[in-house]
Image (cartoon, grey):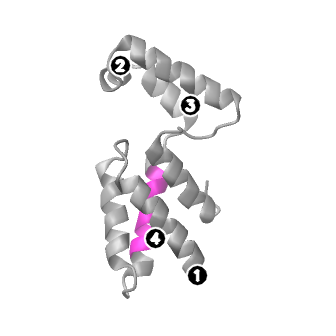
Amino acid sequence: MDDKKKAVVKEKVEELINSATCCQEAKDAGKAWLSACGTDKEDEAYKALIAELKEDIVTVDGLIEFAESEAGAAVFGGAEAAKGVAAHGREIKAAGAKYCDCPACKAVEAILELEGQA
């Protein structure tokens, strides 16, 4: 990968791993790639990172479905808060969003877009 693209990916990976909404698996994959940068393990770690991110990104439909579940209510701080998240999901979907717009998913989407996989 060229230096310009690598700089953008590094920035987005930093955003991802510092996001409160990032799952541990994505944090681990991001940290592993950052540690591997400049070594003979970089390409392998990047492939693993992309594979993990493709598994972890939440579609807007997935966000709405989760927010409307009991588990979503528990995560989002109660049924009323979860209803607000679901309503937000519907709003961003109506505006054309494909994925959740939390900080982690936004960083993942940017990385996947660079790879033509979003």
Q: Position of residue 73 (x, y in %)?
A: 35, 19
Disc 3 element = helix
Quarter of the image holding residue 94?
Answer: top right
Label 2, label 3: how far apart the Cα atoms are:
16 Å
Within 10 Å of the Cα at label 1, are there few (<14), some (14-19), or many (20+) other Cα atoms?
few
In the image, is residue 38 above or below residue 95? below
Q: Amino acid at mark 4?
A: Lys
Q: Is residue 100 left or right of residue 80?
A: right
Label 1, label 2: how far apart the Cα atoms are:
43 Å
Task: Specify start and end residues of the magenta stretch as a single range.
Answer: 45-55
Task: Residue 83: say if magenta.
Answer: no
Q: Name the mark nearer the viewer: 1 or 2.
A: 1
In the image, is residue 9 above or below residue 81? below
Q: Amino acid at mark 1?
A: Asp
Label 1, label 3: how far apart the Cα atoms are:
34 Å
Q: Amino acid at mark 2?
A: Ala
Label 4, label 2: how far apart the Cα atoms are:
34 Å
In the picture of the structure, the residue carrying the numbered disc 1 is 2
In the picture of the structure, the residue carrying the numbered disc 3 is 61
Q: Position of residue 63 (x, y in %)?
A: 49, 31
Question: Looking at the image, is mark 2 or mark 3 earlier in the sequence?
Answer: 3
The numbered dot on residue 33 is none
Question: Residue visible at 30% across and 60% down?
Answer: 28
Quarter of the image holding residue 3?
Answer: bottom right
Question: Looking at the image, is mark 4 or mark 2 earlier in the sequence?
Answer: 4
The numbered dot on residue 73 is 2
Within 10 Å of the Cα at label 2, are there few (<14), some (14-19), or many (20+) other Cα atoms?
some
Q: Amino acid at mark 3?
A: Asp
In the picture of the structure, the residue carrying the numbered disc 4 is 47
Label 4, label 3: how far apart the Cα atoms are:
26 Å
Disc 4 element = helix
